[in-house]
Amino acid sequence: MNRTWIPNSVTALSVFFGYLSIMYTFQGYFVTAAWLIVLAGILDSMDGKIARKVNACTKFGSYFDSLADAINYGVAPALLFQQAYFSDWTILGSVVTFLPIVCSAIRLARFNVLSEEEEKDGFFVGLPTTVAAGLLASFVIFMNELMKSYGSPTIAAGLMAISSLLMISAVPYEHNSIITRRGWKGLLLLLAVLTLFLFQGRALFAWVALYVTYGLFRSLLQNIRDLELRKTV
């Protein structure tokens, strides 16, 4: 029996959430739109696992997932930030919000080319699109919970630029499977789940930001060590 419809249905549902996010964005419900991006990301973490579980991994499913990611984590957060922060920035706002769209497309294309290598060493090359979108969406939720507003457009622009550039960088980021297999990191993941139930949007932004900065600083430290080793040779 062909079971490919099962993971593909999960992917289609994630696209539906991305579409709803865009709809709510244009209606001015920015927090709802942000949560829908987060929900799309949760589904995105499930479709591949489901495909492997039911032995339904196909090239079509992989390409479908990439196209879905381009919508959910490129277009949806870009439009959310455009409407929430940059509606008065005219052409500059359009340039800033174009960054996650083009960078997520480049990131996904590179992932499709290098996926076998990435699976082998346990690291993604560059910030995953789901995490970049999660960082942007959780920022909207965090600021709304903290200040009952959406925060500074300047800070939002900086966050969008950094997350976009990290997507196309060579900074390695760990797979979830690697994190859960390591003792203290698995406990850290459990702590993250607990705090998400207690503090919701505030905890979500804090943990996503921690994952992003941890990978960046680990990469910088590794580059410094490599440079020192080359000097001693």
Image: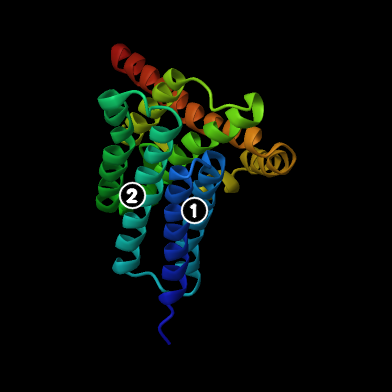
Type of residue at label 1?
Ala
Q: Quadrant of residue 193?
A: top right
Type of residue at label 2?
Ala
- Give the side of residue 11 with respect to residue 99, left or right: right
Residue 142 x, y percent position in the rendering: 60, 31
Instruction: Give the residue drawn at x 30%, y 12%.
Output: 231
Element assignment for label 2: helix
Up/down of 156 relative to 75, above or below: above
Residue 85 x, y percent position in the rendering: 43, 27
Up/down of 226 relative to 197, above or below: above
Q: Quadrant of the C terminus?
A: top left
Label 2, label 1: how many angstroms apart (C-alpha)? Answer: 12 Å
- Residue closer to the observer: 216 or 35: 35
Task: Determine which of the numbered discs, if any, sits on residue 70 in the image.
Answer: 2
Furthest-right residue in this view? 198
Instruction: Give the residue drawn at x 48%, y 31%.
Output: 212
Residue 145 x, y percent position in the rendering: 65, 31
Number of marks in the rendered image: 2
Up/down of 44 relative to 184, above or below: below
- Give the side of residue 198 with respect to residue 99, left or right: right
Task: Determine which of the numbered discs, if any, sits on residue 177 in the image.
Answer: none
Nearer-N-terminus badge (2/1): 1
User: Is residue 146 at least partly visible in the picture?
Assistant: yes
Q: Quadrant of residue 15?
A: bottom left
Q: Identify the residue under disc 1.
A: 40
